């Protein structure tokens, strides 16, 4: 099986990643909080990866920027 880089996946581009960073920065300024990425390992296995996190007050955030209409499962998330 061929390994695929994140940048090669459909629906992923440097423009989208930059837009997501911009959105996190804008939210951080609006809330007056420092938001950062956070990975949380789950006791049962697996991991949650948050795009924006603050411990106090608690903020958990997933950011999704897309160029064009959403497709597939994104429509029902």
Image: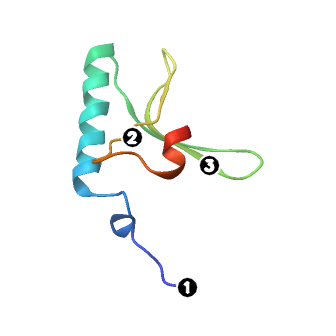
Tell me the quadrant of the picture where the N terminus can be found.
bottom right
Q: Which one is earlier in the sequence, the residue at label 1 or at label 2? A: 1
Residue behind mark 1? 1
Tell me what residue is drawn at x 29 percent, y 47 percent.
68
Please name the residue shown 38% across and 63% down the image: 10
* Image point (75%, 45%), residue name: 43
Q: CA distance from mark 2 to mark 3?
A: 18 Å
User: Depth-wise, is mark 2 or mark 3 nearer the camera?
Assistant: 2
Circle 2 packing at 10 Å, graded few (<14), some (14-19), many (20+), is: few
Q: Residues within 10 Å of mark 1 (few under 14, many from 20)?
A: few
Report x, y in % for residue 34. 34, 24
**Label 1 SS:** loop
Label 3 sits on a secondary structure element that is strand
The residue lying toward the viewer, choosing from 42 and 3, is 3
Q: Which residue is mark 2?
A: 64
User: Which residue in the structure is indicated by mark 3?
Assistant: 47
Considering only order in the chain, which callout, 3 or 2, is on the residue closer to the N terminus?
Answer: 3
**Whole-number angstrom distance, CA of label 3 to CA of label 1:** 23 Å
**x, y (%) of residue 27?**
31, 23
Q: Work out whether 13 lies above or below 31.
A: below
- Report the side of 61 relative to 46 (left or right): left
Above or below, comparing residue 42 to residue 33 in the picture? below
Is tag 3's residue or tag 1's residue first in the polypeptide sequence? Answer: 1
Secondary structure of the residue carrying tag 2 is: loop
The answer to whether the residues at label 3 and label 1 have Cβ atoms under 8 Å apart is no
Find out whether the residues at labels 1 and 2 contact each other: C-beta distance under 8 Å. Answer: no
């Amino acid at each position: 099986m061929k390994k695929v880089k994140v940048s090669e996946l459909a629906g992923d581009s440097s423009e989208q990643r930059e837009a997501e960073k911009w959105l996190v920065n804008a939210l951080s300024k609006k809330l007056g909080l420092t938001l950062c990425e956070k990975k949380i390992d789950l006791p049962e296995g697996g991991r949650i990866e948050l795009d924006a996190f603050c411990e106090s007050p608690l903020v958990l955030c997933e950011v999704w920027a897309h160029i064009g209409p959403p497709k597939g499962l994104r429509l029902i998330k």
